[in-house]
Image: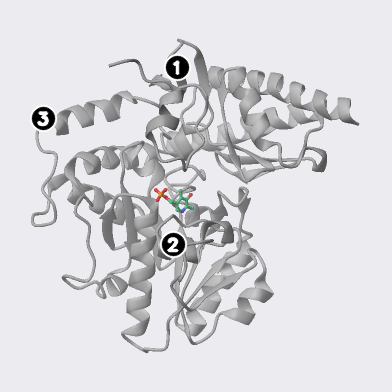
């Protein structure tokens, strides 16, 4: 067999992605190495997934141990790692019951189905689901329909019904839309794909109040911001607003596929035997690692480290911007940071990402105007500083383009 390259992608893969020109082949901590031996600092973690870095020694040890015991049972039997993980999640959050699946979309699919059924069991006309414009909740047909980005549903209709999309952070819109017929409101405490936009505390408090008033369930989609990235174990703890259902995925398995839906005992009772399920959900291999992830992230020094690194990263980006004037806003929570480009550079976020990669730094974008940073929660200070240095080289190139065209 001949070697595989980026060109192979176009020859054998469905063309729904546009991956980078280089192919990383190994990773350790916050460093990646590609096929040519070039090294990169990782400010992306996949998409906020490998939050404890690549091949974290404690996770590697747990995975090796579980590999030698048991990989899979399906739901005809329960298993120890899933029970330990569920117990840890109920001990560390508001939740009393946990459902495991394999991705963020599946966690939201479960949350939306649960909320619909919980409402409809009480009143057959209580079916409305309210979500926010610019939101992202996954790629199943239900979750893209609930998501607030029409480009992701184009061509896939007919779509599930009785969905309402309101402006994010707009209290008046929430008051005008949420009513007796609302089954659930779903919101990302910090919008990720939509541009790294934190909700205001007043907004989340108002959603809580309106849901209580109208008997609707409040769902927090913490697939991206959860598991320590906010600076708390979950972002709802930063806000002090507690949802009825919380979804998690991405960083929960540090790269192994897992999703989870957390809720109360009373709401969970709606999912009686046979109402919902997943073949792989809660498999021992992934749950053993996720249990260790939650244990490590819950340590006070891990969460304090996120807050410290937030300041280092934001201060570093601000210093770069003071020299090169390419961003209008630098925002986010914990280690999910977005830097919005000035109008003259709108549409160029991917160019910044490509320039950064050239200088040996992996970043992300959120839309076409925002550069997104999601480094490891435990990134060494030296790597953080080196990453910022490389990012400045990229920014200087992009800034020079503005000067040339001005
Ligand atoms: C990534 C993401 C999802 C979807 O997760 P998948 O694992 O890709 O299905 C859902 N919600 C939010 C907020 C996300 O960032």
Query: Rounded to the nearest whole Å, what is the CA distance between mark 3 and mark 2?
Result: 36 Å
Using the image as rendered, state which of residue 199 and residue 47 is in the foreground.
Answer: 47
Examine the image and state in which quarter residue 398 appears. Answer: top right
Say if disc 2 is inside 8 Å of ligand 1. Answer: yes
Distance, label 2 to label 1, CA atoms, is 34 Å
Label 3 near ligand 1 (CB < 8 Å): no
Which residue is at the far right? 406
Which image quarter is the N terminus in? top left
User: Within 10 angstroms of label 3, few (less than 14), some, or many (20 or more) residues?
Assistant: few
Q: Quadrant of the C terminus?
A: top right
Give the numbered dot on residue 231: none
Q: Quadrant of residue 308?
A: top right
Residue position marked by numbered label 3 in the rendering: 68
In the image, residue 250 lies at what x, y percent? 40, 44
**Which residue sits at x=66%, y=72%?**
171
Determine which residue is flagged by label 1.
Answer: 34
The kind of secondary structure element at disc 1 is strand
Q: Pointer 1 and pointer 3: residues touching (CB < 8 Å)? A: no
Percent position (x, y) of residue 203? 62, 66
Label 2 neighbour load within 10 Å: few <14, some 14-19, many 20+: many
The residue that label 2 is drawn on is 143
- Indicate which label's residue lies in the foreground, 3 or 2: 2
Q: Is residue 161 above or below residue 367?
A: below
Is residue 186 among what the camera can see?
A: yes
Q: Earlier in the sequence, mark 1 or mark 3?
A: 1
Callout 3 secondary element: loop
Q: Is residue 242 visible?
A: no
Please report whichever mark, 3 or 2, sits nearer to the chain's N-terminal start.
3
Q: Earlier in the sequence, mark 2 or mark 1?
A: 1
């Amino acid at each position: 067999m001949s070697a595989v390259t980026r060109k192979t992608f176009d020859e054998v893969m469905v063309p729904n992605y546009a991956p980078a020109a280089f192919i990383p082949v190994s990773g350790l901590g916050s460093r990646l190495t590609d096929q040519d031996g070039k090294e990169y600092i990782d400010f992306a973690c996949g998409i906020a997934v490998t939050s404890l870095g690549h091949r974290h020694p404690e996770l590697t040890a747990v995975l090796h141990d579980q590999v030698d015991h048991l990989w899979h049972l399906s739901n005809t039997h329960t298993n120890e790692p899933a029970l330990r993980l569920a117990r840890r999640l109920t001990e560390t959050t508001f939740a009393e019951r946990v459902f495991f699946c394999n991705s963020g979309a599946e966690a939201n699919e479960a949350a939306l189905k649960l909320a619909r059924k919980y409402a409809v069991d009480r009143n057959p006309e209580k079916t409305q689901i309210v979500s926010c414009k610019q939101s992202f909740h996954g790629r199943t047909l239900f979750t893209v329909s609930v998501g607030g980005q029409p480009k992701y549903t184009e061509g896939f209709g007919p779509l599930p019904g009785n969905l309402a999309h309101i402006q994010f952070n707009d209290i008046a819109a929430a008051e005008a839309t949420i009513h007796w017929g609302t089954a659930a409101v779903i919101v990302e405490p910090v919008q990720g794909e939509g541009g790294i936009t934190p909700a205001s505390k007043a907004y989340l408090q108002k959603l809580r109040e309106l849901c209580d008033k109208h008997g609707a369930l409040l769902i927090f989609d913490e697939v991206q911001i959860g598991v320590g990235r906010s600076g708390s174990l979950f972002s709802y703890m930063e806000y002090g607003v507690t949802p009825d259902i919380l979804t998690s995925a991405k960083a929960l398995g540090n790269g192994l596929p897992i999703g989870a839906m957390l809720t109360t005992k009373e709401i969970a009772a709606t999912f009686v035997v046979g109402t919902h399920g997943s073949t792989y959900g809660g498999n021992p291999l992934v749950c053993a690692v996720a249990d260790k992830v939650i244990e490590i992230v819950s340590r006070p020094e891990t969460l304090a480290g996120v807050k410290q690194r937030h300041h280092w990263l934001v201060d570093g980006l601000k210093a770069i911007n003071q020299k090169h004037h390419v961003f209008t806003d630098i925002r986010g929570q914990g280690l999910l940071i977005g830097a919005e480009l000035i109008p003259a550079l709108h549409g160029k976020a991917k160019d910044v990402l490509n320039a950064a990669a050239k200088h040996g730094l992996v970043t992300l974008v959120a839309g076409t105007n925002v550069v997104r940073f999601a480094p490891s929660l435990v990134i060494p200070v030296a790597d953080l500083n080196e990453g910022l240095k490389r990012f400045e080289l990229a920014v200087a190139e992009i800034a020079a383009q503005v000067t040339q065209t001005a």
